[in-house]
Image: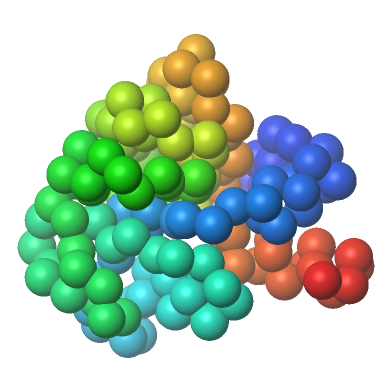
Amino acid sequence: MGPELTLPERELRSLLVEANVVAVVGISSKPWRPSYGVAAYLQEHGYRIVPVNPNEDEVLGELVYASLLDIPRDVRVDVVDVFRRAEHTPEVARDAVAIGARVLWLQEGIVSEEAARIASDGGLEVIMGVCIMKVRERLMAQGGS
């Protein structure tokens, strides 16, 4: 299965440059987990991360919310980056639409046509099956920012 990027690279790069707040759904406090590493990378590169996991309290110095719907309304989430199994992603997509996020990003190995349809019908851009960190690294290396 190849990457499921749905945006042209120029638009994808613009999206990553313009985004400020990334909600990381399924984040872990364990440093060896991919969700932790990707969130740390995003934080180090100037993004505000909003951790989402009902089983965590604090990750990377940030308060963790049980769900996207628990994030305070004054926090404008640009990207919902998802580290959950595919069968859980339609619910995440519905919540992403409800909070007015701009992008639903399903991480490497996670593809859900149902979640993509829900998010797309709700006005969100959808990217799935690829890692936000790897894509950002590649695009920024090509484009210089």
Image point (59%, 59%), residue name = 132
Q: Could you tell me which residue is drawn at 31 percent across and 25 percent down?
A: 98
In-front residue for pair 112/98: 98
Q: Position of residue 39 (x, y in %)?
A: 43, 71
Q: Residue furthest bottom?
A: 31
User: Is residue 67 at all visible to an observer of this figure?
Assistant: yes
**Looking at the image, which residue is at 44% across and 79% down?**
40
In this view, the residue farthest toward the front is: 74
How many marks overall? 0
Left or right: residue 83 versus residue 126 is left
Residue that appears at 16% across and 44% down: 70
Residue 1 position, x and y percent, is 63, 45
Across and down, in percent, residue 73 comes to 26, 40
Q: Is residue 72 left or right of residue 104?
A: left
Q: Quadrant of the C terminus?
A: bottom right
Q: Is residue 29 left or right of residue 45?
A: left
Extreme residue toward the top, this view: 121
Q: Is residue 106 left or right of residue 136?
A: left
Specify how the rendered protein is coloured.
rainbow
Q: Is residue 51 above or below residue 116?
A: below
Is any part of residue 82 visible from this angle? no
Q: Which percent across, then down, holds residue 103?
A: 53, 38
